[in-house]
Structure formats: C-alpha cells, structure tokens
Image (cartoon, rainbow, N blue to C red):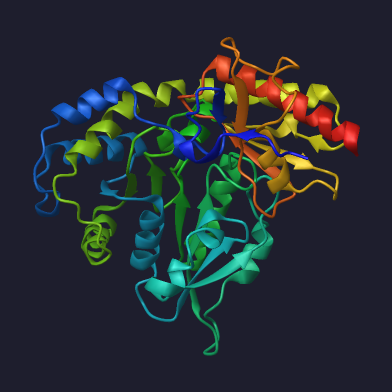
Amino acid sequence: MYASVETGGDNGTADHVRVVDFRSDTISVPTPSMRQAMFTAVVGDDVYGEDPTVRQLEQRSAALFGKEAALFVPSGTMANLLAMMVHCSRRGTEAIVGDIAHGFLYEQGGAAQIAGVLLNTIKNNPDGTFCLNELVRKFRGFDVHEPNTVLVMVENTHNICGGKVLPLDWLEKLAAICREKGAKVHMDGARVFNAASYLNLPVSRIVRDVDSVCFCLSKGLACPVGSILLGTKEFIKEAHRLRKALGGGMRQVGFLAAAGLCALDEIVPKLKDDHARTRRVAEAIDQMGSPIFKVDLANLHTNILMVEILSKQVHSSDFAHRLATVAPGEMEAGVVDADGKGIAVKVSARDWTFARIVIYTNITDEDVELAIKKIRYVVAEYEKEL
C-alpha cells in the first residue's frame, strides 16, 4: 500500500522531501552561537582538573542546582550509573526504581551488568510518580535473606509517562520516607529544566529534596555531547574517581563544555517555546476527533507528546513508517511545503500502543504546521481504510 517515495538512506536530505524530525530531542543540533563558543573555548586536561571551561560549567551548574559540586560526564546513562555506584557502594544493595523508568528500561541493565546493584521495580503511575505506601513496603534489609535498600531513583520529567513533571509535594514526602529509612534519592533529571520551565520555578527548587541529580546537555539543550551529575562534594569526589574507571575521562573536553555554558544562557530560557509548539501539535490532533488516534491534552506538561493508538489494527511502527513516507498522490493532494516538497514526519515507535513526538529548539513554527498537515492527512487515510 505504501510503496512510495521515502526519505531513504540519505538521512532525509532528498531534494523532493521536507523532513520534520520529531523522534527525540537528542536529534537537536548546536546553535551557531554554540558552535562559535566551542571553536573559541579555552581548554586543558580535565582528568587533571585543569580544563577551565569544564570547571566553569560544573561550578555554574552546582550554583544553579543548589548542590555542592558537579561533574561533567559523557552521557546521562553514565551519570545514572555513577550515582548508583556511589550510593550503592556496598555489595548486596539494591535501588528502587519505577517500572517504566528510563534507568530500568533503556540503560542496558548497567546497574547489574557493571555496578552489581539490584534494581527493584515499583509500578509507575501515569504521572510518573509511584505509590508512597507501596514504596515503604518495598524497603528491605531487615532480614538476612534480603538485600539492603539504600537508594530510590525518580525520573523528572518522566519520558514514557509523556514528559510529566513530578509534583513537588510528592518529592518532599518521598525524600522524608527515604531519610527515615536511611536511603538516598537520585533524580534522573535528563529533562529537569523542562520541569522547572513548566512549574516556572528555579531548577534548584525542583531538586531541593534529592541527594543527587543529573541533567542532559544533549537532549533539549541542543549540545552535541554530555550530562552533568550533581551532589555533595564527597559524592562528586567518588563519582570523579569512578568516571575514570568507566572510561569517562575525556581530557580537553572544554570544547563540549563551552556548548553547555551557552545552552544555559540561550536554550534554557526558550524551553517554554518547545512546550508551546508541542501543545500546538496536541491541540491539532485533539481537534481531529479521531476514534483511532488520541492525545491527553489536559495532562500535557512539556515537550513530549504521546499519541495513543486505540485500534489493534494499527501498529505504532506502521504508523511511524507511514508518517515518514511520501505516498503516491499525497503531494498532488497538497501535502507539501511552500517549495512544493513532500512532507515526511519522523516519530518514535516500537512495539508500543502509542507513538512519541518530542519537540526541541531546532523545530520551528513552520515545521509544526507542516507536520500537522501531514498528520491530518495520514490520520484521515487510516480512518477511511479501517
């Protein structure tokens, strides 16, 4: 049915196709000012602690987050792994984590594979939280047969829950429980600046009640590489040591840190624009009133939109493939950009009952309107065929 002109293997740069890439904010690319900052960065050997640009980024991040110290690492996966390795340094310990958290689903089981830490899952609610009464019952170590629960991990914003922002009162209660139990709290804050933007609060308030936190530079902040891990001076001292063992010592890394400094000034204040563009797409889908494709407009928080697929006859991967395809007759029907090019929209899809749309700083208002045009066409096509 969809044998057609596709974006193909040229990474979507074919002259006849306009690509709008909604797969992830990891697709974001550095801005011109970031590239200039990287080009002119003053660098040194970061393993020796002698890269002034890295030190500046770490110090500024610590101040923004209200934490004692910070560490530049290559990725959020490494940041989360380091947090587990530091907090769960004794053998026979475990961390409690949401059952659809990124750290459980999509970081290759590094907790067990590398850190020797057991992950004990707790069911995530649709808003990214989990039941605190159940959390209390999850703590172990009171019996010689059990591992010791020493860490609880949260994700904010929560990816698979659709970019949800965790409620501050819930975080405060969770932290109080963990203090009483003698456990630490780590926040996977890959998109925590989106949470701060949504709540219109300083990021330091969002992370006030957690012992450690990381945020990603290479997602919505549009940097090419890197994450920042934050916590106490002692925590970061040990994380710095373990980073070396994981291969994360990167020498003249100030070229990358320079982009991070630029992102804090240039991108963070504009995250609300990404949220507004995400809402524009959500409203357009909602207004279609489709019996097959739905969005939860009332509970949309940030830059991640889940498009629920209600028909068992429609598979998420097929829907994604169709959106990325310029089918025969489509351009003749007017599904084109201002230059007459066909439109290909890329979204994330796996064996899910939804497709994921993520918007980031490089996505323009024009991109959004073109994507809406294509989505409307494809949704109408599905409705006609089913």
Q: Quadrant of residue 44?
A: top left
Q: Residue at x 53, y 49 (%)?
A: 155
Residue 175, placed above or below residue 261: below
Is residue 192 among what the camera can see?
no
Q: In the drawing, does residue 291 fall left or right of residue 172?
A: right
- Residue extending furthest toward the bottom: 144
Q: Quadrant of residue 131?
A: bottom right
Viewer can see residue 83 = yes
Query: Image check: 106 left or right of 329?
Result: left
* Image coordinates for residue 60, horizontal then vertical, percent: 25, 34
Say which quarter of the image contains residue 277: top right
Q: Vertical placement of 189 versus 238: above or below?
A: above
Question: Measuring 72% from the left and 14% from the top, which residue is drawn there?
Answer: 334
Q: 54 or 334: which is nearer to us?
A: 334
Q: Position of residue 26 (x, y in %)?
A: 45, 40
Relative placement, left or right, of 75 versus 286 is left
Above or below for 316 versus 332: below
- Farthest-out residue, top: 338
Residue 21, image x, y percentages: 54, 32
Which quadrant of the figure contains the C terminus? Answer: top right
Which quadrant does the N terminus fall into? Answer: top right
Using the image, determine if residue 42 lies above or below residue 151: above
Residue drawn at x 40%, y 36% as measured from the top left: 204
